[in-house]
Amino acid sequence: MESFRMSKNVFELEIEKKNPCNYIALYHSISMDVIYIKKAMYESIKSALLSNGTIEPNDNIICSLIEKKYIVLYETDDDAEYRKIADTINVINPTTLRLQLTESCNLNCTYCQIERNYKNNNQIHMSEDIAARSLALFAKYAPKGKQKTIILTGGEPTLNFKVIKLLLQHTKELLDSYRFILFTNGTKLTEQMAKLFKENNVLVLISLDGTKVQHDIYRKDFSGKGSFDNALNGYNLCKQCGCNVGISGVVGTHNVNELDDSITDFFLKIKPDSLGLNFEHYLLNADNSNILPMEKYADVILSTYIRLREQGMYLENINRVIEPFVKQRINAKECAALGRGITVLPNGVVGPCKTLLVAGIIGKHLDEIEKLDSLKDDDVFLEWSNRSTYTLECCKGCIGISLCGSGCTYDSYVLNGNITNVDKRACIFIKQILDFMITDLFCHIQHSNDNDIIIPTAEDRQKIYSTIRLDDNDLKRSVGHEI
Ligand code: SF4
Ligand code: SF4
């Protein structure tokens, strides 16, 4: 008779309900399947497996657990599936071009990791020549027939409006399907700009950390004056001109206590088309001990998400995890820098991640990169494209392997001095969100169902979105919020 055991990719999770719950959740870390099973039933299956590994494969419940690879034959190689996925992951297929249009910014925000990490900031703008060459380089490597994203950042990119206009005009000659995302502090936006962004369907992401009180604590100009009023003017201007306009904020000690309260009220009132609320990145060679603990960030971002979803508003940071879970689509690489993106600085230096490029830690000039036959011939692009949760030794056997994308590689570098480890904040975040999703899904589907085992359908999993409507082609789903 054949002998069985539980797969080592299956994790037991308590359902965190206020009332005692007689179910336990079993989560498969590779397939992201969830099965809710009565605790007593599960205990009896486990003890049968533990005593001699023999079970009755004809039983319906056992059949389901075998079919979903929760229970496997004793001699099964649990890592086989893992290796199969790892083998397909190390590709360079850039769909994102990130252009830093200027080194210059009219603001002096306290936590800006770009301005503070700069090795040599000469306040230069990207020239038309560098912009055109960057676009041509991207067109050479970007896959045909797939939507491409061009992200315009700085410094403050609107200070180099001449190059924005050039890019909007010429991109159609080189790329088949694309969209633009502009990251701006909003303070220099004019009507002329907003009209152009509307005409070209540019998603404008404006930095706003909350209402005036919280926003102005960190986001000031060089004289120390808060930037909220001008940023909000820019936001309203874009709205009036009919642009797709979103908000990209940073959550820190300055706004965390009001985030799921007055700040959420404010965002609901001004109705951005997309919303991203990032945690603070580390600064290089600086004391980072005052950064908000991840546990607190995750708690607050979850309660904010719950409030926003009731009104159908999308929150990018959470949906970045919820979407792979709901669709059971593996997210092994969180950020475009891991094989899906090319970044170019104003001086023509090219590499995967803007933050390490400005610090002079990685990067080569366009002159060199243009001569390559493949981006794989560049050791930095190659090393970054090889990083994923399925290739990092420290992620092997982790519950979050299909969900977390390995977090921010730059933060991992600051913490560990290399990119072969992770920033443990990503692990804390993913585990809190996963606990939430498992419990939330259970609350949505259990109701009167008293079966010994509950297996959510694809439709059931969608219920985590509540009233949020998602469309894969929607500009509102910004991939650019992560920076
Ligand atoms: S998310 Fe992190 S690794 Fe990715 S581009 Fe931004 S700073 Fe770099
Ligand atoms: S980064 Fe952390 S949570 Fe994500 S797979 Fe690796 S160890 Fe797990």
Image: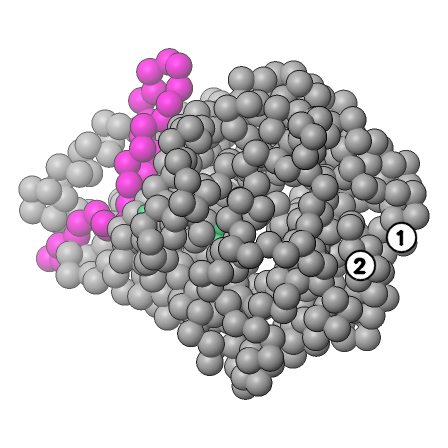
Relative to the observer, which residue lies in front, 144 or 152?
152
The percent position of residue 441, horizontal first and vertical second, equals 48, 32
Q: What element carries label 1?
A: helix
Vertical relation: 283 (above or below) 147: above
Callout 2: SS: helix
Asked if the magenta segment contains residue 22, the reply would be: yes
| Residue pictured at 11% horizontal, 57% vertical | 1
Q: In which image quadrant can residue 400 be found?
A: top left
Q: Does the magenta stretch include residue 470?
A: no
Please rate how many residues cluster around mark 2, counting C-alpha atoms within 10 Å: few if below 14, some from 14 to 19, many from 20. Answer: many
Q: Mark 1 highlights which residue?
A: 196
Instruction: Indicate the colouring scheme.
Output: one colour
- Place of residue 14 in the rendered image (x, y in percent of width and height, measured from the top left): 32, 28
Q: Do the residues labelled 2 and 1 touch (CB within 8 Å)?
A: yes
Residue toward you, 234 or 204: 234
> Which residues, given as a range, are shown in magenta?
1-28
Q: Quick one: label 1, few (<14), some, or many (20+) residues within 10 Å? A: some
